[in-house]
Structure formats: C-alpha cells, structure tokens
Amino acid sequence: MNKIKDFLNKDFNIGDIFSEKIKIKDLTVFFRQLAIMFSANVQIADIFKILLNQGDSKLKNIIEDLLNKIENGYKLSEAMAFHPKVFNKYYINILKPGEVTGNLDESLNFLAEELENNYDTLNKLKSALTYPIFILITMVGVVGIIVTYVIPKMTEVLSETGGQLPLVTRILLSVSKFFVDNTILIILGTALISFLCIKYYNTDKGKKFFHSLLLKIPIFGKVFQKIYIARMSKNLYVLIRSSVPLIDCLNITAEIVGNKVYEDIIREATEKIKNGDKISSSFAEYKEIPIMFTGMISIGEKTGKLDYVLEKISSFYIRELKNITDSISSLIEPVIMVFLGIVVALIVAAVLLPMYSLSSQI
C-alpha cells in the first residue's frame, strides 16, 4: 500500500520534464535530508549550508539560491516559490501551514514520504514494463535479421532452381525490400513525424489530444485514469486540510494533475463552483470522472466532511491502482504471447516453406 500511495505529484506525461532538469530521485533525497535535519533541530540556514557542501550538481545552484534567500529573510516556502518548475504550488501550500503553526518538520516529513512513495511507484511501473519492452525489441531485431539476411539468401538459391516462392515469403521479401531501398527516407520521415508530433504536443490542443489517447490505451488507460483520480482527490484533501480556500485548491490541483483532459475538467468545474454549483454536480457530467467519485463528493458536501471523504476516495483508488500495478505483467503477458505467436508463425512459415520447396525440387 505504501509503495503506491500518493502517486500524485509527478506529471506522468511524455515531454513534461522539469525545465531545471531535476529528477524525481534528486528531489526525493533533497526533501528527506531536509526533513531529517530539521527534525533534529538544525537551523534552516545551517541545513542548506550542509546540503550545499554535499549537494548534487543539478541541485547545487538551487540550494545555493534557497540559502541566499533564507539568509535575506525569506521563509522556506517563499524561497522555493522562485523555482516553480521544481517546487510547484502543491509543495508551497503544504509548507506554508507548517511555517505558520511551527510544525514545519511535519510538513517536510509528509512531503518526503510523498516523494519516496512516488519514486517507488515509478520504479515499480518501469520494472513491470521492462519485460514486455525487452520482448518486443528482441522480436523486432530477430525479425529484421531473418527478413533482411536469411530469407533473401534462400530466395537466391530457390530462384536459381526456378522454384516459386510461397505467398507469405514473397510478402515478407517485399516488406524487406521496401525498408532496405527506402532506409534514408524512412529515417527522415520518422524524424519529421516525431518533430511535428512534439511541436503539436506543445500546444494546448495537441496536449489534450495525446492525453486523451493515453486514457484510451488498452489495459493502461484504466491505470492512468485511476492515477489521475487518486491524484485529484489526494491533492484536494491535503490542500483543504491545510486550510487552503476551495477555489485555490481546485486551481492548484488543475495545474499539477498531469493530464490536460483532467486539467480542463477541473478548470471548467471550478468556474461552475464559482457560480454557486455544488462540487459533485460540477464534475458529474464528465465521463472521465467515475460515478463513485461524484457520489462520494456529494455525501461529503451533505455531511460537511468533504476532506474526510476525499481522503477515503484517494485511499480507494490507491488500493485499486496497487492491485493493477502488482498484476500488470500478468495482464500484458497474454497479449504479448498471442502477438509473439502470430509473428513467430509467420516467420516459421516464411522460412520453412521455401526450404520445403527447395528440398522437393532436389
């Protein structure tokens, strides 16, 4: 449960990378070190001096700037606000109540745990995807070698005997010839398409298109949906608990939810809430929002325990996400095996049938 908990602060999207090139691992270590030393009653300025002497090169400039600002009278949250691409509004709004109440150590420990759980979850997802990706790459390599070198050699021998190639072999040879004869064009075309896709992705319309596709991917689409719903509910719970005004909670969550589809949904719902609509009814019309989510929100509004309900919703989806993540390899494996079986059957047929034709003519 703890390894999947709160996969909520990392934007799970292609192309969304910290502009200051800070990895989630670096940020996780940074917050954990900060939390440990602050809990040990080390002065905040001394903490940053220690971190500066042992800090990672990617964080060193940021740590130095934070130290500079803290020594000039800025609070930690105010200093971090100068680096919004590294410390987003979610982090800032978690730290502010701790600074006001004198419980900054609790806020820092909370953020450190959040990032550690997030980092563990990312590694778990990567591990689950390693096997299928390795199988696919290996399969492409083997097919490429067979189609490019093995079958053409056999074809030369068979052609000399005047034999007729089987249909499946002729198809693979045609595919091979196309790729060999047009290698440069294919590389340039792929590069151009990739460039155009990246340019399109960097527009609001393009980002929404690709993020919408992300939610429709077989098997993984449901996983991503649960990630975003868990992220929404957890962020809203934590921010509301920290006494952040509701509209600000929604705006901050929209910024860091990590998917343009859900970002637009939250922003549109926020406008309706500003006009007096209930939170539950504002989200109810969107198919991307589960009925359970809006139903539970409605209960929270009626009972006045919205933060409590949001915590329960996030816990539910975190458990669901954990169950799916734990079994993700077993979900993918049957699909890979079927696909692999079809490809192997075609390759075997393309190789063995010419051999059979050749042997029958000897």
Image (spheres, rainbow, N blue to C red):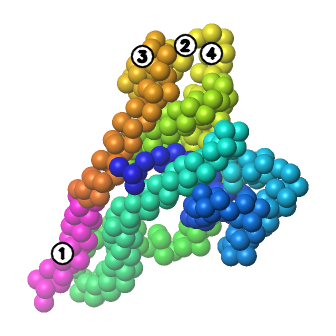
Dot 4 falls on a residue whose secondary structure is helix
Farthest right residue in view: 72
Residue 138 sits in quarter: bottom left
Q: Nearer the viewer, residue 66 or 87?
A: 66
Of pointers 1 and 3, the one earlier in the residue sequence: 3
Range of residues picked out in magenta = 336-362
Whether residue 310 appears in this view of the structure is yes
CA distance for labels 1 and 3: 67 Å
User: Of the numbered discs in the image, which one, if any, rests on residue 299?
Assistant: 3
Query: For mark 1, what is the residue?
Result: 353
Question: Which residue: 30% across, 54% down?
Answer: 326
Side of 360 where 185 appears, left or right: right
Say if 324 sits above or below 345 in the image.
above
Q: Residues within 10 Å of mark 1 (few under 14, many from 20)?
A: some
Image quadrant holding the C terminus, namely bottom left
Question: Which residue: 49% across, 16% down?
Answer: 304
Q: Nearer the viewer, residue 152 or 51?
A: 51
At label 3, the amino acid type is Ile
Query: For mark 2, what is the residue?
Result: 278
Q: Position of residue 125 (x, y in %)?
A: 41, 58
User: Of the numbered discs in the image, which one, if any, rests on residue 272?
Assistant: 4
Of pointers 2 and 4, the one earlier in the residue sequence: 4
